[in-house]
Amino acid sequence: MATEGTASMSENTRPRYSRILVKLSGEALMGKADYGIDPAVLKRIAGEIQEITQMGVQVAVVIGGGNIFRGAGLARAGMDRVTADHMGMLATVMNALAMQDALESLGLYARVMSAIRINQVCEDYIRRRAIRHLEKGRVVIFAAGTGNPFFTTDTAASLRAIEIGADVLIKATKVNGVFSDDPVRNPAATRYERITFDKVLADRLNVMDATAIVMCRDNRLPLQVFNLNNSGDLTRLVRGEDVGTIVTYE
């Protein structure tokens, strides 16, 4: 898939990365709605992923489930935490299937691989098989987090990116990168073009949960944060343009 135009690609348009993992929150799929999936947002994201695959980049995706169920929130409301987290994992499978359908409607090949066994709707996660799918040009969508309660999909994204040997973990947010403070609450907050994992941890910057950050740092996996609401930014980021913030180990 998407390899025909790669050979003729000039040096100026060659992508910065050859294999990426994109972390999307479930809320990102809602658009302006209060719940569920906005088909227009889903189609736009799928279109940007298509553009990236046409550059010859291998793409993996992890999607959260917060637009349907959020395990931690259900637990705070009184539900058993393990049960709540299992419901959240199933929500990510629903989102992953929706993304698979959106990608396939554009002519891409996509595979959903779940950390919990649900064979009638998607494949089990097997690392070597996931890498083989990527090598064949298929978009791989990892669902059900790590398959364990108490772990976020941020941590699952870090884990899967490390396992498949991704060049970078790309985190989609609602703001254009990492800021010194919440830019919504504090307009004077400044954006970092580049920052270290240690500073993110020391300053308690709200990027990803601490476990995910430590995993990236200890495995020297760069993290790039960008605003998903800016149409085309994901493609520009992969091309090497100055988009968002890059978090590195040094």
Image (cartoon, rainbow, N blue to C red):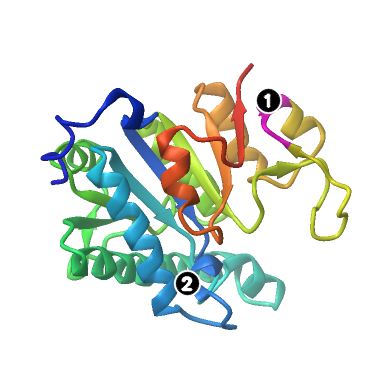
Instruction: Provide the residue designation for mark 2.
Output: 87
Magenta-drawn segment: 192-198
Quadrant for residue 81, please give it: bottom right
Disc number placed over residue 240 in the picture, else none:
none
Q: Quadrant of residue 177?
A: top right
Horizontally, residue 159 falls left or right of residue 2, namely right
Residue 169 picture location, percent across and down: 47, 38
The answer to whether mark 2 and mark 1 are in CB contact below 8 A is no
Q: Residue at x 64, y 49 (%)?
A: 176
Please tell me whether mark 1 sits on a helix, a strand or a loop: strand
Please tell me how crowded label 1 is: few (under 14), some (14-19), or many (20+) other residues with Cα within 10 Å.
Answer: some
Near mark 2 (Cα within 10 A), the count class, few <14, some 14-19 or many ≥20, is: some
User: Across the whole image, how many numbered discs are drawn on residues?
Assistant: 2
Of callouts 2 and 1, the N-terminal one: 2
Q: Residue at x 40, y 42 (%)?
A: 21
Q: Is residue 238 above or below residue 77?
A: above
Which residue is rendered at x = 49% and y = 42% of the image? 170
- Whether residue 143 appears in this view of the structure is yes
Q: Amino acid at mark 1?
A: Thr
Residue for point 37% across, 51% down: 61
**Gap between marks 2 and 1 measured at Cα:** 34 Å
Q: Position of residue 47 (x, y in %)?
A: 33, 61
Q: Which residue is mark 1?
A: 196
Q: Quadrant of residue 18?
A: top left
The answer to whether 187 appears left or right of 227 in the picture is right
